[in-house]
Each structure stands twice: as C-alpha cells, then as structure tokens.
Image (cartoon, helix red, strand yellow):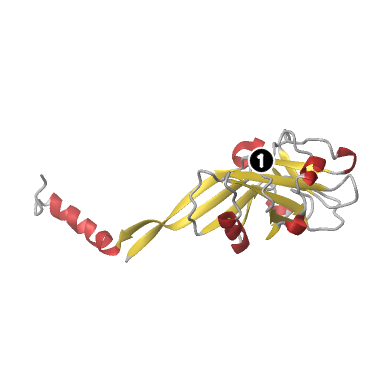
Amino acid sequence: MGIGHSAVVIQNADAATSVRDGDYADTNYGAETQLKAKARSAEFHRRTLIRFDLSNAQTSFDDAILSVTQLTNHANQQIRVFGVTDGNDNWDEHLITFNSATALGLLDSSVAADLGVIDFSPANNGQTVSFASAALTNFLRDGVGDDGLVTLLITSTQTWNIENAVFAAREHGVLGPTLRFTDTDAVSLPIAALMFAPLALLMVSLRIIPVH
C-alpha cells in the first residue's frame, strides 16, 4: 500500500481558429488572437476549432481539464464543447475556413461527442475558465487517432445570440487553450518508507547507522 502523488501535465493547443459562414465562409481567421462562438442568422454563425497534439502525452490519466481564457464578454454566454470523431484532425489553422471545415466534417456536431458546456459571465472577463467532465476524459482516452491529434469543436448554445462568446487563441501565448491531465498514480511511495524515512535520516545524523 502506498500514498499516490498527483502528476500534472499541461498541454497547449496545437492549433486553434474560428470560422464564419455566409459571405465569410471562405475566409481564414487563423492569425487572429481571439476565438469566438456565436449562433444567429447566416453570416453571423461562428464556431471554433481547437486541436491538441497528444502524440507525446501520457496515455494513462485520471481526469482531464480544458481551460480557456475568457476575454471581453458583455453578456452571459454558454458554449458547448464537442469532440470531433471523424478523424479529420490534420487541418491547418492558417488555411481552414467554414467551407473547408464543413467539407471535412469538422463542424457537424450531430456526429461529434457532446462533452458538456462552459459558462461565461462578464464578471469573469480576463480570467481562466476551466471545464471538466467524464465525457471529456473518456473522449481524450479513446478518441485520439494514431497520429495523436484530437479536435474539439466549440459552438454557442443560444439559438439567437447577439454577442460573441470570446476567448483567447493560442496566439495569446499562455492565455491560449490548454488541457491539464492529472494522474494520482504517477508516483507511489510505500507508507512504511514515508513513515520511517525521517527516523532513518536522524539515525544517520547521530551515526547510529554507519554511512559508507
């Protein structure tokens, strides 16, 4: 029997961008520092794609937490997180558009894994908002392809939304989207070792136990 110590691994987004429909459906927004989600009439729909490269990440973990930095939001917002399951994860954030993402099946939430919702509030502007669910953890355990890439789709839950839900892109550096993995079994020390380690050090210092 031992005492586990949680290991925490932070993974930054590999790519992230928003896309917009209507007259802007062939426009790429990959260089922007903001990510947006909005549901309204044509030309005002905005969705966000976030990709993580987990090829070198630890495969065994207890839970996963998605964190984004909320920017200027003037009203309460709720965004929904989906896990894209079709395997078309090798997209380029500086080339992807609404039309090309649609062709790849990246924007079809009906065939994606519903992972839950994140609530935004004006009171949290400039702060990190974290989201965790069993569905997110399970998707990241089972939904990663052989290339190690995984894509999350972010949409607005409102059917008529005047304001964008706005959060930081990875161009913001440390403010960009991250995944945090925890593994409580990463390091396990026997209880006896923990109990007697201080006593052993004391005995060495008193020369009760010879040091060679």
Residue tagged 1: 90
Q: What count of labels does the image hold?
A: 1
Vertical placement of residue 43 versus 109, above or below: above
Q: Is residue 188 left or right of residue 118?
A: left
Q: Measuring 89% from the left and 43% from the top, which residue is drawn there?
A: 22
From this viewpoint, is residue 77 visible? no
Q: Could you say where residue 41 lies in the image, as x and y percent from the top left?
A: 90, 50
Neighbours of disc 1 within 10 Å: few (<14), some (14-19), many (20+): few
Amino acid found under the numbered disc labelled 1 = Asn
Q: Could you say where residue 178 lies in the image, as x and y percent from the top left?
A: 59, 46
Instruction: Pick the quarter of the image with the N terminus.
Output: bottom left
Q: Measuring 68% from the left and 53% from the top, which residue is drawn there?
A: 85
Q: Is residue 77 left or right of residue 207?
A: right
From this viewpoint, is residue 135 visible? yes
User: Quarter of the image holding residue 12?
Assistant: top right
Instruction: Pick the quarter of the image with the C terminus.
Output: top left
For this orientation, the residue located farthest to the bottom is: 1
Q: Could you say where residue 33 lies in the image, as x and y percent from the top left?
A: 71, 37
Task: Pick the residue in front: 6 or 27.
Answer: 27
Task: Pick the residue in front: 139 or 40.
Answer: 139
User: Quarter of the image holding residue 89?
Assistant: top right
User: Quarter of the image holding residue 200?
Assistant: bottom left
Q: Could you say where residue 115 lies in the image, as x and y percent from the top left?
A: 67, 59
Q: Is residue 205 left or right of residue 106?
A: left
Q: Measuring 14% from the left and 51% from the top, which residue is drawn there?
A: 204
Secondary structure of the residue carrying numbered label 1: loop
Task: Pick the residue in front: 7 or 21.
Answer: 21
